Image (cartoon, helix red, strand yellow):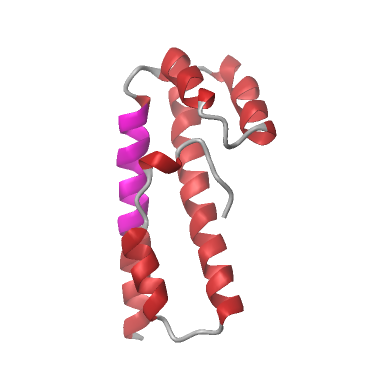
Amino acid sequence: MAILFYDHLVTTSEIDGLLAEIDEAENQKGKTIQLIDDIIFQGIISLILEKLEPHHHHVFLTIVHERPYDPEIISYLKEHAGSDIEEEIRREADKLVKMIIHDLQSEDEM
């Protein structure tokens, strides 16, 4: 899992706990973790693109592509998407994490 500019806003410890309990091969767990990371990434990027004016999309996406770990991305977003963007990202991440937990628990019951 790569370090991303929003990692400090996302709490996945409950997901990690559920994954630790799953009796699957390590390579399958790795694929599941990658899928979870992708779901969270896509959800957060989608939220940010909704908040940014369209003329800022290219710059934002270029920065994320070139330097996804750069904490200055948050500063850019505060300037162009609103000062409360960190809280909005946190809420979106919490929503996505709850959805993933629900899906993992539902899958475990099958």
Q: Quadrant of the C terminus?
A: bottom left
- Residue 4 position within the rendered picture, expressed as x and y whole percent measured from the top left: 53, 41
Q: Quadrant for residue 93, please give it.
A: top left
Q: Quadrant for residue 78, please give it.
A: top left
Say left or right for 86 vs 1: left
- Residue 38 position within the rendered picture, expressed as x and y whole percent measured from the top left: 54, 53
63 vs 105: above or below: above
Q: Quadrant of the N terminus?
A: bottom right
- Residue 104 position within the rendered picture, expressed as x and y whole percent measured from the top left: 37, 71
Q: Main secondary structure of the magenta part?
A: helix
Q: Judge whether residue 96 is colored magenta.
A: yes
Q: Residue at x 53, y 74 (%)?
A: 29
**Residues drawn in magenta:** 86-98
Q: Residue at x 46, y 30 (%)?
A: 48
Q: Quadrant for residue 58, please give it.
A: top right
Of residues 68 and 88, the one nearer the viewer is 68
- Residue 64 position within the rendered picture, expressed as x and y whole percent measured from the top left: 61, 32
Total tally of numbered discs in the picture: 0
37 vs 84: above or below: below
Say left or right for 66 vs 56: right
Say left or right for 90 vs 7: left
106 vs 81: above or below: below
Q: Residue at x 36, y 81 (%)?
A: 108
Of residues 44 and 21, the one nearer the viewer is 21
28 vs 7: above or below: below
Q: Judge whether residue 38 is colored magenta.
A: no
